């Protein structure tokens, strides 16, 4: 029942924020902040409980399960399950949720109540995606998080928001519908094989599928996750959406929504379709590599700072795709760490860029410069985040990329070698961005107000988490490894 | 005929009787408009209530003409419910236009009776009677606002088209009857499904054309946008929901038990119609700037979705058709309630520009209209999502993968234009100002109630569809067994 | 009794039906359109009678009576609509055109297309 709180609480907070916040402007902010903080505490408590061993798996690798009937006529139930993997992502959701609320504290002044309603609804949907182990419920949550996200971009975004919001929606929606069709296909295949009509993930595992059908269904799932991730040719929505979204929207997009794609690959594609994913793996790995190189290259040539950060996401999430399909424990662990640290570092960068834009009213790198001297706190935080972005040891990003490359090397030498070139790109674009924004001289940045307390709190928390991931990755890896081990066991892969 | 047999007929009897009462009320009462509204509303509510008593007696056959099974009662409940909502939204609509002619309610009730007869017909004769009982009042309803010339023209156009489609349908029926020797729907359909004679095929094809016109599926859809646009909003709501719904139910009753829908040449024909309708409706809607016309195009696509479930046939298919109809009814009624409620005396609220800034002036109406549009687009937490799901499930279960993928692609296309409207609701009103909407008048109470009720229904069905789905599956199982028993 | 083979009757019905359909597509006058629809409906009715005769049942004739009634109702509404329209659309009714000078275009197009009407009133022609 506790698991439902992760979904219900943001929902309730969202409605409360909408109704109570429509009079005064601060009520909405406080309510959604409180909701997310509570969820974070809950996640932290679960974390400590499982790390100290007082919370033991109840069934397989599931630390907690809750289930109640929803639509019994079609074998659909409201089943939530939490294992180490989902716990990590739920914790990330709460943390970034807080960061998003803080980031919009000053920036959002219009329709504040409705903003927080949408924000909380997205977070509820994302938590639902990470927790649901009924495939129908999963698809439901998957779609649910899109609509409020669309509103976040469409109402509070920047100049080209309508187009960007629509593009985001159409891309993710068509992927989501293909997945929905594939889910129903899997459900029917399972029903035909066993006579049991159910959407329960645990029962659907190990459904016997003939190779063609397995491949088609796998591709249906893959389509949705690859769009979200985004994998290379399907990323077209991402730069626009990230650039045009308000700061909180970008944080959630980059920090969480993209992660649902990677999470879906690990949780659903690999274990549900082991044979099909095995035969698809080489292609998927090359898609990942293409994303790494392409994203890095495009990031290098951007002049819009937010767009630049957006393209680095394409590059970093390429590593995730690579790691997921390398089929070994290092690579999978690496992919998980990479997702977590990318969520934190890119989220923090978006907050930084957002607060810069609030002050300078531009995102153009050419009009920045000299911030190091004009606003030293900006410079310091910018430096730390840039170093995280380029994967300096000590940050989570380094661990993630390193583990992915290590695992990929074991799977295919050529893929790993080409992917490693991406690291060079990362070095170049990160330093170029830092150079242009913070060094040099510019007349525009003379009068800049430095970072405020709220922003420092949000950024600081995220950077501490990044360091924690970079210096003590074992905690996160231990939590995830039991779940990942179960998945690898299904795959019959090398541990 | 036992007492319970007549009890089963009660809903139809109440509908017909109260229609006559309304007519008397119009003749003798002083407050004609209010009396007609009250009497008709009382009749509809009584008919709805009588369904509970009739329910236990089902299934039974009433003479050769009517089969009163649970499926029929379910669709009666739908039509009557839709009519009640339409009356709610029309009360203030006509009053504001100083066209307080209570005959509207009489005609609406007759059309509702037509729907009910159509849904329970078991013979070509009652099919035809129900259909005409439905269509003839519609001619007048479309052209009801006599000062609007466009309405009159469209009414005439609808009359001609309805006549032609009836002629096709009847000629087709005559051919089928000629070959099978039975006017009974199930018997004829079964005999026809076994026969490969040219006459029967031609007959079924002609019937398909006739039914296609009524359902407004492509390529018989051309009339839809004009009629939707020209008719008063409440009448449009009725055409979009009750009229098409009753026809879709009949389609299931006629074709599904005999397996004509699921196999053979007609499966291909209906599959093609479904595919073409989805694409035509959605693509035409993409660039439409008039909300009523947009809903017309979208209804073409929605009937295409329904046909996917229809082609899937079997219990799953019938249940999916019925469930989707429920979702489609509530979503459309909510949308039209918003249109009717927000129309002013000078202008129908039809241009999308008209809705800009609605969220500021009427936040609740904007929220309800958003729910309705999102439901039509099939997004989660709305009835439309669950409707899409049951159609996907039925289609995939019948291995109609091509249709299912077309459906998925089309839902995505459709989101494009629904979101265009939704996005307009939350934008600031245009500075240029169409003028007519500022200041926005308050929504009439009855229309607001209708809108709120439908919006709540959308969310409730979207969040907790379990019992409704189970119920509809149970009912849909009925029609197959009844068809078997009828032999 | 030497009965006429039902194929002949059916052929007649089909011819009538097609005649009505062709008429509907070619004629533009509202009254003629209404007439053509009636012809199509009666063709269907005739087909029912033929079919009824084949099976020796009354069903076909019953359907025909239903059909006649319905056609009457439809014509009643149709004519009423034409009457109302005649006040608004120039030349919707042939008599009116005959009464006063040059007959205006009496067609469906004029009925459904507002711009066309305005053009016609202003004496413009459109391709």
Image (cartoon, rainbow, N blue to C red):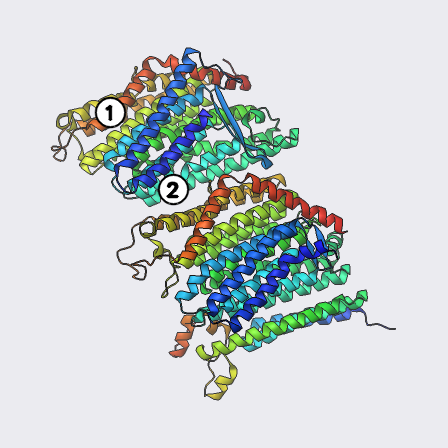
Q: Residues within 10 Å of mark 1 (few under 14, many from 20)?
A: some
Read off the chain for label 1.
A
Point out which mark residue A167 bears. Answer: 2
**Which one is in front in this view, the residue at disc 2 or the one at disc 1?**
1
Question: x, y percentage for residue A396?
Answer: 33, 18
Q: With B270 as the anchor, is B464 left or right in this view? A: left
Which of pointers 2 and 1 lies earlier in the amino acid sequence? Answer: 2
Residue B162 image-quadrant placement: bottom right
Q: Mark 1 highlights which residue?
A: A457
Alpha carbons under labels 2 and 1: distance apart: 33 Å
Question: x, y percentage for residue A485?
Answer: 49, 16
Residue A442 image-quadrant placement: top left
Q: Residue at x 15, y 31 (%)?
A: A449
Q: Nearer the viewer, residue A11 or A146?
A: A11
Question: x, y percentage for residue C43?
Answer: 68, 71
Question: x, y percentage for residue B445?
Answer: 40, 56
């Amino acid at each position: 029942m506790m698991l439902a709180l992760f979904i219900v609480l943001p929902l309730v907070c969202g409605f409360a924020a909408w109704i109570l916040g429509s009079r005064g402007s601060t009520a909405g902010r406080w309510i959604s902040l409180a909701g997310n903080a509570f969820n974070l505490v809950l996640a932290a408590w679960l974390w400590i409980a499982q790390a100290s061993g007082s919370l033991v798996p109840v069934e397989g690798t599931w630390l907690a399960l809750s289930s109640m009937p929803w639509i019994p006529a079609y074998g659909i139930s409201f089943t939530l399950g939490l294992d180490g993997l989902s716990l990590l992502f739920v914790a990330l959701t709460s943390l970034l949720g807080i960061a998003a609320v803080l980031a919009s504290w000053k920036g959002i002044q219009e329709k504040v109540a409705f903003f927080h309603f949408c924000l909380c609804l997205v977070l509820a949907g994302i938590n639902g995606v990470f927790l649901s182990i009924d495939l129908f419920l999963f698809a439901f949550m998957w779609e649910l998080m899109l609509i409020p996200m669309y509103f976040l971009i469409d109402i509070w975004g920047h100049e080209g928001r309508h187009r960007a919001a629509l593009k985001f929606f159409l891309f993710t929606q068509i992927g989501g519908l293909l997945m929905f069709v594939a889910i129903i296909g899997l459900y029917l295949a399972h029903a035909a094989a066993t006579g049991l009509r159910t959407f329960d993930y645990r029962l659907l595992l190990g459904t016997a599928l003939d190779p063609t059908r397995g491949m088609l269904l796998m591709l249906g799932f893959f389509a949705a996750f690859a769009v979200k991730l985004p994998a290379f040719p399907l990323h077209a929505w991402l730069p626009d959406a990230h650039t045009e979204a308000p700061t909180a929207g970008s944080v959630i997009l980059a920090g969480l929504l993209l992660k649902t794609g990677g999470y879906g690959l690990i949780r659903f594609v690999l274990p549900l379709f082991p044979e099909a994913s095995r035969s698809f793996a080489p292609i998927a790995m090359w898609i990942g590599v293409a994303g790494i190189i392409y994203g890095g290259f495009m990031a290098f040539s951007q002049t819009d700072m937010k767009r630049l950060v957006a393209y680095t996401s394409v590059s970093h999430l390429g590593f995730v795709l690579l790691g997921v399909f390398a089929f070994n424990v290092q690579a999978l662990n690496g992919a998980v760490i990479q997702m977590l640290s990318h969520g934190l570092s890119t989220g923090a960068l978006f907050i930084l860029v957002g607060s810069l834009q609030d002050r300078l009213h531009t995102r153009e790198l050419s009009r920045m410069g000299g911030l190091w001297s004009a606003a030293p706190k900006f410079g310091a935080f910018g430096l730390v985040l840039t170093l995280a972005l380029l994967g300096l040891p000590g940050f989570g990003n380094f661990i993630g990329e390193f583990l992915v490359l290590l695992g990929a090397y074991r799977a295919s030498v050529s893929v790993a070698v080409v992917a490693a070139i991406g690291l060079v790109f990362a070095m170049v674009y990160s330093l170029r961005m830092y150079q242009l924004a913070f060094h040099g001289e510019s007349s525009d940045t003379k009068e800049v107000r430095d970072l405020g307390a709220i922003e420092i709190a949000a950024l600081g928390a995220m950077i501490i988490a990044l360091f924690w991931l970079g210096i003590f990755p074992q905690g996160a890896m231990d939590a995830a490894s039991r779940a990942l081990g179960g998945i690898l066991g299904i795959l019959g892969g090398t541990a | 005929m036992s007492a319970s047999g007549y009890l089963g007929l009660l809903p139809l009897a109440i509908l017909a009787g109260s229609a006559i009462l309304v007519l008397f009320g119009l003749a003798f009462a002083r407050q004609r408009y209010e009396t007609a509204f009250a009497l008709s509303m009382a009749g509809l509510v009584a008919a709805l209530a009588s369904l509970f008593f009739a329910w236990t007696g089902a299934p039974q056959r009433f003479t050769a003409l009517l089969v009163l099974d649970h499926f029929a009662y379910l669709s009666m409940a739908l039509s009557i419910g839709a009519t009640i909502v339409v009356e709610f939204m029309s009360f203030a609509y006509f009053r504001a236009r100083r066209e307080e002619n209570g005959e509207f309610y009489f005609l609406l009730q007759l059309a509702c009776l037509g729907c009910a007869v159509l849904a329970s017909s078991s013979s070509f004769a009652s099919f035809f009677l129900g259909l005409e009982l439905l269509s003839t009042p519609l001619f007048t309803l479309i052209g009801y606002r006599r000062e609007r010339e466009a309405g009159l023209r469209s009414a005439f156009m609808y009359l001609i088209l309805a006549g032609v489609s009836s002629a096709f349908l009847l000629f087709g029926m005559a051919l089928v009857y000629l070959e099978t020797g039975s006017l009974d729907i199930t018997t004829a359909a079964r005999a026809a499904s076994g026969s490969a004679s040219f006459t029967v095929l031609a007959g079924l094809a002609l019937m398909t054309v006739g039914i296609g016109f009524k359902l407004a599926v492509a390529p018989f859809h051309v009339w839809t946008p004009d009629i939707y646009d020209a008719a008063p909003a409440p009448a449009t709501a009725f055409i979009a929901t009750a009229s098409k719904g009753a026809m879709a139910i009949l389609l299931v009753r006629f074709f599904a038990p005999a397996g004509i829908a699921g196999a053979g040449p007609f499966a291909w024909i209906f599959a093609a119609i479904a595919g073409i309708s989805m694409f035509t409706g959605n693509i035409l809607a993409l660039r439409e700037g008039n909300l009523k016309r947009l809903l017309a195009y979208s209804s073409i696509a929605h009937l295409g979705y329904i046909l996917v479930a229809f082609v899937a046939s079997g219990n799953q298919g019938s249940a999916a058709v019925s469930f989707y109809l429920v979702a489609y009814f509530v979503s459309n009624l909510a949308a039209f309630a918003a249109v009717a409620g927000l129309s002013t005396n000078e202008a129908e609220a039809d241009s999308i520009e008209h809705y800009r800034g609605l969220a500021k002036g009427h936040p609740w109406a904007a929220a309800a209209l958003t729910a309705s549009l999102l439901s039509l687009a099939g997004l989660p937490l709305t009835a439309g999502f669950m409707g899409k799901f049951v159609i996907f499930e039925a289609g995939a279960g019948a291995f109609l993968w091509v249709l299912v993928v077309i459906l998925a692609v089309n839902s995505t296309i459709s989101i494009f234009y629904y979101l265009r409207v939704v996005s307009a609701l939350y934008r600031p009103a245009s500075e240029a100002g169409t003028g007519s909407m500022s200041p926005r008048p308050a929504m009439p109470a009855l229309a607001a109630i209708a809108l709120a009720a439908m919006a709540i229904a959308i969310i409730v069905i979207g969040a907790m569809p379990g019992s409704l789905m189970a119920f509809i599956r149970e009912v849909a199982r009925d029609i197959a067994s009844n068809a078997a028993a009828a032999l | 009794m030497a009965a006429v083979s039902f194929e002949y009757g059916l052929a007649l019905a089909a011819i009538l039906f097609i005649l009505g359909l062709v008429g509907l597509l070619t004629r533009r006058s509202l009254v003629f359109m209404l007439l053509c629809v009636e012809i199509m409906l009666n063709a269907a009715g005739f087909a029912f009678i033929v079919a009824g005769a084949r099976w020796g049942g009354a069903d076909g004739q019953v359907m025909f009576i239903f059909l006649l009634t319905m056609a009457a109702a439809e014509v009643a509404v149709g004519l009423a609509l034409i009457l109302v329209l005649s006040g608004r659309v120039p030349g919707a009714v042939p008599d009116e055109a005959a009464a006063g000078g040059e007959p205006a275009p009496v067609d469906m197009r004029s009925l459904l297309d507002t711009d066309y009407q305005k053009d016609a009133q202003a004496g413009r022609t459109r391709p």
